[in-house]
Amino acid sequence: MSLQAAPISQTSPAPWWADAVIYQIYPRSFADGNADGMGDLPGVTARLPYLHNLGVDAVWLSPFYVSPQADAGYDVADYRQVDPRFGTLQDFDTMLAEARAHNLKIIVDLVPNHTSDEHTWFQDAVAAPVGSPERDRYIFRDGSGDNGDVPPNNWQSIFGGNAWTRLPDGQWYLHLFDTKQPDLNWNNAEVRAEMVSILRFWLDRGVHGFRIDVAHGLVKADGLPDWAAQTKMVEGSERRRPNPEDTILTPPYFDQPGVHDIYREWNKVLSEYDGDRMLVAEAWVEPMEQLFQYVRPDEMQQAFNFDFLLAGWDARQIAESIEESLEQAGRVGAPSTWVLSNHDTVRHSTRFGLQDPTRFPKGINATDEQPNEELGRTRGRAATLLMLALPGSAYLYQGDELGLPEHTTLPDHLRQDPAFFRTNGVERGRDGSRVPLPWEADAPGFGFGDYDDAGSTPGATPWLPQPDTFGDYAADRQVGMSGSTYELCRRALDYRRRNSLGQGSLTWERQHNPESGVVAFQNGPVLVVANMGIEPVKLPAALKVEVASSSDAVGNGALKPNNTVWLTL
Ligand code: NOJ
C-alpha cells in the first residue's frame, strides 16, 4: 500500500506550504534583543541566520500584538499593533524583510475566537447598555434564577471554572478561556468584517499566512444549549476511544457546521494575493475525518495534526495515526501535517522520558513523576527524525532542534499560565514548555538576552528561569558540533529538501511491525526504520545509514531500541 501526502499537484509546482517545515517561535522566549528578560522581534531578526542555517522553510510566530498578556498574548487588545514588550511595527517589517532575505516565510497568529477584555470593543460593550450594538459584538446574556445570578448555561471554561463572568449591571459574558478573553459573536457582521480587515492588514504587509487560534470554536450552537462535560485543549492520555463505535460528542461551542463559511470567505481573501498565502487551523477536532473538513479545497490549507502529537512513543498508535492522516488528507486533496510539540504541550523529549511514554500530563511540577532525561532525549531525537521523513508538512517547536526538555520543577510562585490558577494548580500548566531558549552555555541566562555573540550584553534575568541542565542544550554547544541534535536536524532537513521527501509517498516496508514496536516505511530513496520496541531490529545489509538519530543507533547490523535511521542504497 502506498500513501501519498496529498494529490496537491493540481497546481504545478506545488505551493510552498505543501511540504514546508515550519518552525514555531514563541516570541517571549526565543531571543531577547533588548536584554530586558523578555524575548522580542529584534531578537527574532538577529537569530534568523540560525534558522536559515538549520534549513527550515518558514516561521510561525505566536502572538506579539498589544495585549495585557493574561494568556501570554492570546488575549489581543489591538490586532494591528506590536506590543511594546516585543518591539514596534517597524521592527516587524525589518524582521519580515530579513526573513525574506534568508528565504524564510513568515506566518503570524490570528486569534479570532476572543479578544482581550482590554480591547476597545469590549470596553465599549461594558460601557454600553444591555441590548446595544456594542454588546452584540460579544456573547452577552441574562442569567437565570430569581435574580439572574445563575449563569446563562452550564459551560465550563477550557482553562477551568465557569465560562461566564457577570458584569455589575447583571449581564453575563461568555469566555471559553480566561475571564480576560471574552468570546466574539460571529453572528455579528461587524465582527466578520473586522477580522477580514485584520487579515488584509497583515497580508498587505507581506506575511505568508496565518495560524488560526481555536479555529473550531468561533461559531456556537443556536440557543447555547447546556453541555455537561468540561472540554480540555489536550484530552487525556487516551488518544483513541477504547471502542471505535462510541459516538464522539461534539460540544455546542466547537466544530459547528457554520464555522466553515468563515474559512470559505477567508480563502477567497487570500486568493487575491500572490505567493500562495496559507491558513493553518488549530482545531482540536475528532474524529480525523471532521478535522480534514477544515482543509477542503475552498477552506484552509493546513490543519495541525494533534492526533499524531497525541500518539506518544507507541509504534501502534503512531502507525495508525500516519496511515489515517495520509488517507484523510488524500480524500480532501490537502497535505497532511505533522507535529510533536508546541507551547501548549509538555515537550515530547520529556513526555517520552516518562514511565508511560504515551502519557500526556498537563504540565509537570517537582512533586510529579520526573522524566528520565537521557532516555527522553534519545527518543525525542528518534521521533523528530521519524517525523521529518514523512510526506507532507512538518512543524518544529522552538528548542525541538536542540532536543530541549520541559522545565519540570518550576516553582508555583513563578507560574503564569491562567490554566494553573483556574484549576487551583491541579493542572500545572504550560509554562514548563515556554522557558527561554539557551543560546550560550556559559553566559548569564544562557545568552537569552545576549544576541550579538560578543558577550557584551549580560541581559536581565529571563522572564522564567531556565533549569541548570539547559547549558548542555545551548545552541553554541550544538551548532557545528557533529552528533548534536541541531546538526542531526540540519542534516535531515537538508536531505529531506534535496530528495523532496515532503512531496513523496509512504509505503510500509517488510520490517514494519507496530505490534513489536517497529515502524518502517519507504519514502522516495529512503527506508525509514524507527524502533520503539525493546529488541534490536535487523536492518537490510545492502543499505547504508544516511541519517541516524544517535551515533550508536546501529550495532551488529541491527537498529537498537529508541532509535530511528534513514537508510539508502
Ligand atoms: C490555543 C493557544 O495555542 C493557547 O496557547 C491559548 O491559550 C488558547 N488557544 C486560547 O487562545
Image (tube, rainbow, N blue to C red):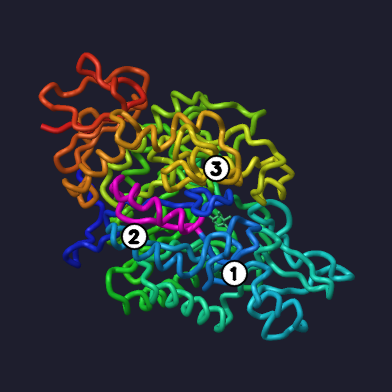
- Disc 2 residue crowd, few under 14, some 14–19, many 20+, Cα 10 Å: many
Task: Identify the image quadrant of the N terminus.
Answer: top left
Q: Which residue is pictured at 89% across the width and 70% down the height?
A: 146
**Disc 3: which residue:** 435
Question: Ligand 1: which quarter?
Answer: bottom right
**Disc 1: which residue:** 221
Q: At label 3, which amino acid type do we have?
A: Val
Q: Which residue is pictured at 60% across the width and 39% down the height?
A: 465
Secondary structure type for disc 1: loop
The rendered magenta stretch, by its main secondary structure, is classed as helix
Q: CA distance from mark 3 to mark 1?
A: 37 Å
Q: Is residue 218 left or right of residue 141?
A: left
**Disc 2: which residue:** 99
From the image, state whether disc 3 or disc 1 is nearer to you.
Answer: 3
From the image, state whether disc 1 or disc 2 is nearer to you.
Answer: 2
Q: Quadrant of residue 164?
A: bottom right
